[in-house]
């Protein structure tokens, strides 16, 4: 796949590149220039069924493949992804506006996700159970579920694209991957190409691209197919709720990693320079388009003014604009409509009395200047809505108890962080904040492939990574055997 001029791409079904059954296509746009980056096939329901056909047909052979062979494929894929980092950088810049540091981070972590999946292949799965009958043995075995529907987002396309299928395939499932309409190449076809080159058999991983208007129909058809036994989705809470409902209607477990309204709490003993650096990273990496991005920073009132001054000064100097330039820190958001949505949140807040410390104004296409606000109140939309853009808000607090109330006062519960030089205080606070992830003496953004990743409340349910990730893509079976004949009452 050429990284800079992607051309026209088909679906990947059963190892073959093919046009959509209807012959329809969809344009994949560069968010920075607005130009067509690629043209992809627009799958219809019959293509969804064909992809599930291929995955179901490949399942018996794949699940019977010895663990050594499977492990070599995943380790080879990790090496290939690292070798193609520059291709990935170009793809992310052109398709999703990703800056070079963000793209390189994506490539590195995605390779590690593949290596962790390789380790999962030979990890112990199951346990020996006690029995009340002499000479009887019981086992709780974790076995692959079957075909997995993997729905991957655009914002961290390599990391989250790989995460959507890696462990699922490693433990013996096959998959149909439907990447976001905003990243059909980077989150889908590029990754499948690497897996195929690494030796993954045909049909084990299939990729469906689609027209934006057809997304709901494609997903519903995929989930409704009886051969699909697991669903995983990473994306917005609104869409995730629909995916969860559809999965429940079809009696299928779903793993949902959704939105967040994440906070960083700075305590009075914090190193203020470190806090500024940490919050800047947590709020503005990938232009704030990470589910873990810090929407809110809470400071003791005595430190609020000084922190805001230093923070705004640092943020104002962040290079923004063309993601193709190596020194750009803040690239475009995913499109002009997203930039306008973020600007509207800021404008609404300022109109209702919020203080603008830096940034704001009108977007330049899909580029929105990094913005810092304070004086945010519950009446302003930005107080409760997930920003998902290069904006964060600074809040003063009178005591730690009230700060924790603010952190918990949201329907979301994905991640949070506390900046303190006293880890004991941080640990005590971690016990009181209701999130799936919490970082002591760090900001809100963090991901490691061996860690259980996911949220609570409206941030979803289920966990990727570690033992929890293996459990998410396997079923437990109770199997017994007897050393001698059983005695029956009749």
Image: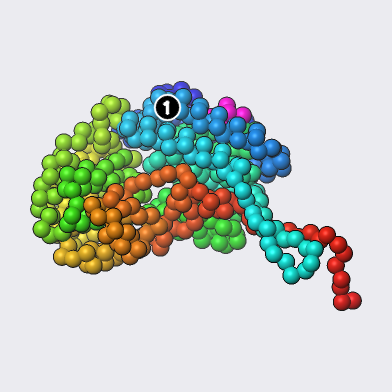
Q: Position of residue 302 (x, y in %)?
A: 10, 58
Q: Quadrant of residue 335?
A: top left
Q: Residue at x 42, y 44 (%)?
A: 448
Task: Based on the picture, tell me whether residue 369 belongs to the magenta stretch.
Answer: no
**Residue 147 vertical position relative to residue 409 in the rendered view, above or below:** above
Front residue of 34/240: it is 240
Residue that appears at 59% across and 48% down: 148
Asked if 362 appears above or below 191 in the picture, the reply is below
The image quadrant where one finds the C terminus is: bottom right
The residue at 31%/50% (across/down) is 444
Relative horizontal placement of residue 453, taking residue 52 as reference (left or right): left
Main SS class of the magenta portion in the image: helix
Q: Secondary structure at mark 1?
A: helix
- Seen from the viewer's position, the closer of residues 59 and 126 is 126
Q: Is residue 164 visible?
A: yes
Out of 278 and 139, give the one closest to the viewer. Answer: 139
Residue 197: image x %, image y %? 57, 26
How many marks are shown on the rendered structure? 1
Q: In the current view of this chain or complex, which residue is farthest to the right?
A: 490
Is the residue 455 above or below the residue 79 in the image? Answer: below
Structure colour scheme: rainbow
Q: Name the residue beneath numbered marker 1.
A: 85
Residue 241 location in percent, x, y?
45, 59
* Residue 217 can be seen, yes or no: no
Q: Is residue 217 left or right of residue 310?
A: right
Query: Bounds of the magenta span?
Result: 194-199
Which residue sits at x=47%, y=34%? Answer: 111
Observer-nearest residue: 4 or 36?
Answer: 4
């Amino acid at each position: 796949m050429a990284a800079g001029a992607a051309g026209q791409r088909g679906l990947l079904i059963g190892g073959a590149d093919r046009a959509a059954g209807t012959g329809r296509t969809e344009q994949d746009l560069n968010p920075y220039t607005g130009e067509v980056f690629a043209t992809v096939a627009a799958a219809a329901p019959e293509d969804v069924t064909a992809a599930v056909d291929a995955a179901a047909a490949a399942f018996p052979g794949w699940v019977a493949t010895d663990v050594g062979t499977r492990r070599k494929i995943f380790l080879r894929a990790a090496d290939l992804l690292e070798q193609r980092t520059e291709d990935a950088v170009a793809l992310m810049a052109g398709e999703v506006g990703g800056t070079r540091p963000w793209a390189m981070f994506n490539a590195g972590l995605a390779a590690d996700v593949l290596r962790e999946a390789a380790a999962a292949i030979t990890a112990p799965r199951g346990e020996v159970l006690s029995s009340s009958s002499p000479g009887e043995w019981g086992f709780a075995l974790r076995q692959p579920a079957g075909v997995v529907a993997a729905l991957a987002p655009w914002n961290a396309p390599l990391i989250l694209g790989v995460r959507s299928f890696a462990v699922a395939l490693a433990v013996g499932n096959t998959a149909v991957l439907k990447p976001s309409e905003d990243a059909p190449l980077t989150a889908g076809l590029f990754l499948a190409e690497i897996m195929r080159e690494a030796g993954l058999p045909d049909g084990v991983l299939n990729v469906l691209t689609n027209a934006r208007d057809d997304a709901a129909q494609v997903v519903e058809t995929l989930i409704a197919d009886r051969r699909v036994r697991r669903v995983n989705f990473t994306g917005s809470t609104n869409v995730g709720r629909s995916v969860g409902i559809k999965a429940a209607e079809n009696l299928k477990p779903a793993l949902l990693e959704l939105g967040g309204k994440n906070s960083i709490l700075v305590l009075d003993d914090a190193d203020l320079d470190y806090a500024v650096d940490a919050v800047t990273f947590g709020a503005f990496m990938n232009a704030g388009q990470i589910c873990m991005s810090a929407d809110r920073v809470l400071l003791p009132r005595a430190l609020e003014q000084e922190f805001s001054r230093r923070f705004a000064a640092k943020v104002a100097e962040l290079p923004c604009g063309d993601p193709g330039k190596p020194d750009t820190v803040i690239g475009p958001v995913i499109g002009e409509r997203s930039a306008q949505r973020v600007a509207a949140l800021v404008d609404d807040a300022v109109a209702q009395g919020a203080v603008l410390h830096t940034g704001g104004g009108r977007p330049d296409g899909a580029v929105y200047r990094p913005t810092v606000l304070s004086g945010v109140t519950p009446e302003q939309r930005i107080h409760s809505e997930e920003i998902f853009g290069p904006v964060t808000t600074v809040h003063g607090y009178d005591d730690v108890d009230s700060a924790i109330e603010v952190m918990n006062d949201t329907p979301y519960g994905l991640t949070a962080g506390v900046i303190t030089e006293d880890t004991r205080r941080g640990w005590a606070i971690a016990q009181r904040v209701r999130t799936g992830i919490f970082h002591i003496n760090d900001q809100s953004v963090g991901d490691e492939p061996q860690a259980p990743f996911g949220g609570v409340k409206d941030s979803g349910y289920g966990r990727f990574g570690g033992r929890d990730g293996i459990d998410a893509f396997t079923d437990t079976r109770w199997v017994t055997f007897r050393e001698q004949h059983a005695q029956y009452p009749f």
